[in-house]
Amino acid sequence: MSTARRKGRPRGFNTEPGQGTIQALNRALDVLDLLSRHEGLSLSEIARGLGQSPATMHRVLATLHARDFVETSPEGQDWHIGPAAFRIGSAFLRHTNVFERARPFMQELMQVTGETSNLGVERAGQVLFTGQVETHEAIRAFFPPGTVAPLHASGIGKALLSGYAPERLARFLEGYDFARFTEKTIGDAATLRAQLAEVQARGYAIDDEERTVGMRCVAAPIFNFHGEAVAGISVSGPVQRMGETRLPEIGAAVTNAARAVTHQIGAG
């Protein structure tokens, strides 16, 4: 009798780093990851950032460039993420219809509130921003797709955590690193639990300068058919425009948008 195994994974497959991995492939992925977090880097900056020799990095870049995963600036001095990386990365969005369904409501949120609207999901214990509709204001919040943020220090993160079952939340908080970014960042499990209770009561979360001084965010969870928070939708902007008196109004708009997307994906 054969033993069933997960489709697409060979016998003995594991995800532990350093076991059964290919060093050259790891280097190429390191380069892509580094470039994705910068507007452009020179060969020497890439080599220095990854602790590799320029000759090694040049070979990696030449290979990636031949497959359109990276490209150079017109002057040939800096390297950037290429179109092939975008095409493959976009497959993550196609994997779920949340982004497609949420886009019209993000547009509406931006128009109604005058502030930037964002969409994010939980990925590897962090918020992964998957979409954004920017405001036309000169001063704005900016979380381009692919940006990550800690769950405890973002509006969408707290919205997602508010949907955790008690057992899952307890496991999440075991040994969690409450990294501090501003004086207002949540620094302990008790404070986070108290805020999550408030989120559940009013329907939306608030990031009050907890990640970036001068910026506020209001977010609400999007649920799937099983009642699980699978994404979060938010509005972010400077505290001068998102004053405390506006938060209930913005919160209602964000909550309504989250409910609409929840309905659109077949839940609620």
Image (cartoon, rainbow, N blue to C red):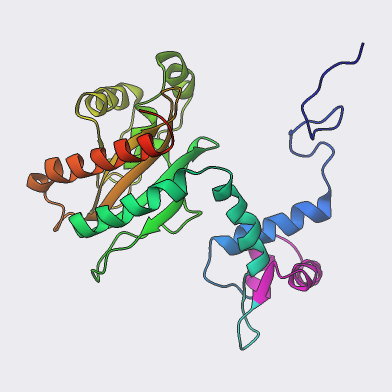
**Magenta span dominant secondary structure:** helix
Q: Where is residue 148 in the image (x, y as percent from the top left)?
A: 47, 48
Determine whether, in the image, residue 62 is placed left or right of residue 259. right
Q: Is residue 229 magenta?
A: no
Nearer to me, 27 or 120: 120
In percent of the image, x 81 and y 36: which residue is there? 19
Q: Where is residue 108 in the image (x, y as percent from the top left)?
A: 26, 55
Q: Residue furthest bottom?
A: 75
Residue 179 seen anywhere in this rendered image of the structure? no
Nearer to me, 169 or 209: 169
In percent of the image, x 47 and y 19: which residue is there? 168
Nearer to me, 250 or 173: 250
Q: Residue furthest top?
A: 1
Determine whether, in the image, residue 221 is placed left or right of residue 243. right
Q: Is residue 208 above or below residue 161?
A: below
Q: Is residue 58 magenta?
A: yes
Residue 262 seen anywhere in this rendered image of the structure? yes
Q: Position of residue 58 (x, y in %)?
A: 77, 72
In percent of the image, x 11 and y 47: which residue is there? 246
* Total numbered circles: 0
Q: Name which quarter of the figure residue 228 lies in.
A: top left
Q: Is residue 210 above or below residue 241?
A: above
Q: In this view, does 138 lie above or below 132?
A: below
Q: What stretch is highlighted in magenta?
A: 43-71
